[in-house]
Amino acid sequence: MSETAKSTEQGHDLGLDLGDTPEGTGYRVLARKYRPASFPDLIGQDAMVRTISNAFESGRIPQAWILTGVRGVGKTTTARILARALNYELPDGSVIQPTIAMPAMGVHCQAIIESRHPDVLEMDAASHNGVEDVRQINDAIRYAPMSARYKVYILDEVHMLSGAAFNALLKTLEEPPPHAKFIFATTEIRKVPVTVLSRCQRFDLRRVDAALLVKHLAGIADKERIEIEPAALALIARAAEGSVRDALSLLDQAIAHAAGKVAAEDVRQMLGLADRVRVVDLFEALMKGDVAAALKELREQYDIGADPAVILGDLAEFTHFVTRVKVVPQVSDDVSLSEAERKRGRDFATQLSIRVLSRTWQMLLKGVGEVQASGRPVAAAEMVLVRIAYAADLPTPDEVIRSLGETGAAPARPSGNGGPASAPSATQNFAPRYEGPRGSSRSSAAVSPRPADDPVAGADEPEPAPTLAIGSFAELVALPPTSATSI
């Protein structure tokens, strides 16, 4: 066997894209080096692979497919694999029809993978979006393929075609010659006319799960003989947001950044992220209402290079995780999270209510936009944390109204001279929203009773009812007389 054939067989075993880089041409990035070359190499797209496999086995192959999904999930790669499966042939002539079983390189495979086959035409619709470009396709599609079984037209970013170009393509797309197939790829499926969608089989490529992405990155790191911490892989997988190409690009960057063993701290510095454990500490301080500790933690994370908007984004992500754990406890088994995050997330989920978590989420979501738009992001982030910390012990309106209904006292109304509203005459002492892991709790939100040594407090004088410490909240829950009567 020749050296080229040996190299090709080794590349197929590793699941590469088989377009090996010739010696002396420079480094090939991981996103290209480990591009899938067959359907078993695709990760996270089991539903699509199963549908296409059944269609090929039963001979029910449509004339057009449209692939949609976020960037980096494998739309163009899937299109090339489809083109290869449609035209798969072995030199001995043993394969006479399209098949998804491609155990070895076929006659046309290498040229298709390298985008240089004369019968498989790739067109970037972003730069070729006019009627003339589509007219060239309509004119050329009438002729039979030169050497392959099918003529395959791959149109990437098809939503960029003009309206006139889409109209020019409709008739050919609906009734193409038997030897022609179309494969479209787009990230904006809503911009594709419904008349085009109705003529294609649509496949929505899913974001790759973080746990599966971590496993995939670990396998590539082993092949590259790169030592990398599991926590660093988890950070890369989360930052990629389900995009395999983004994950491989970040892994490439992390390897260059670390210049050796890739540690989680290297990835945090590269991405400008805060330590996940410190984010959880910040979340705990906020839920306890400890403003000083929260502001101190924010400043320390900012001083070591963390972006304030990213810190709030991580807080929102952890809030979302705790909420999911409260609703579905099995979520805490996610391997892409550290053991500390999973354990402390379960603790928070048992002590915090859905109301508090949803309120925190809404305030963080709004706060991220404020920080990004602010000229002083650190100050804006601090103000967001102050609001969340003081809201941690804030009773909900229905709790206050329920307490007023139980005592039978009508809520106070705002004073007519524009002064501050008086507090309700009787309320309950609302417990803090979160108690620490050892049962420690912050003082109640209610005002302390009058000291015993106060000379005004006499034996016959009834003890005044406690009032809410939050000044303006009584005004927020004050109801008009008609509403109070209906309670």
Image (cartoon, helix red, strand yellow):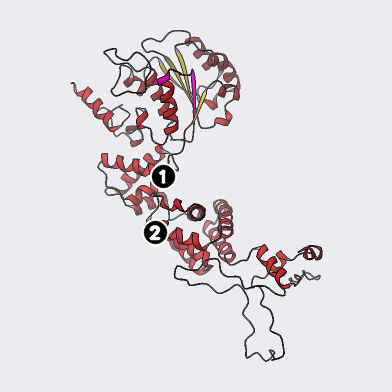
Residues shaded magenta: 57-72
Q: Name the quarter where the N terminus is drawn.
A: top left
Sort mark 1 into few (<14), some (14-19) or many (20+) by Cα contacts within 10 Å. Answer: many
The answer to whether residue 297 is left or right of residue 256 is right
* Callout 2: SS: helix
Question: Is residue 228 positioned above or below 478 on the image?
Answer: above
Q: Position of residue 128 (x, y in %)?
A: 50, 21
Residue linked to disc 2: 340
Q: Is residue 479 visible?
A: yes
Q: Residue at x 30, y 16 (%)?
A: 107
Residue under label 1, please give it: 210
Residue 87 spot, x, y in % from top left: 37, 17
Q: Residue furthest left?
A: 1
Q: Position of residue 446 (x, y in %)?
A: 62, 74
Q: Is residue 373 above or below residue 458?
A: above
Residue appearing at x 29%, y 14% in the figure = 94
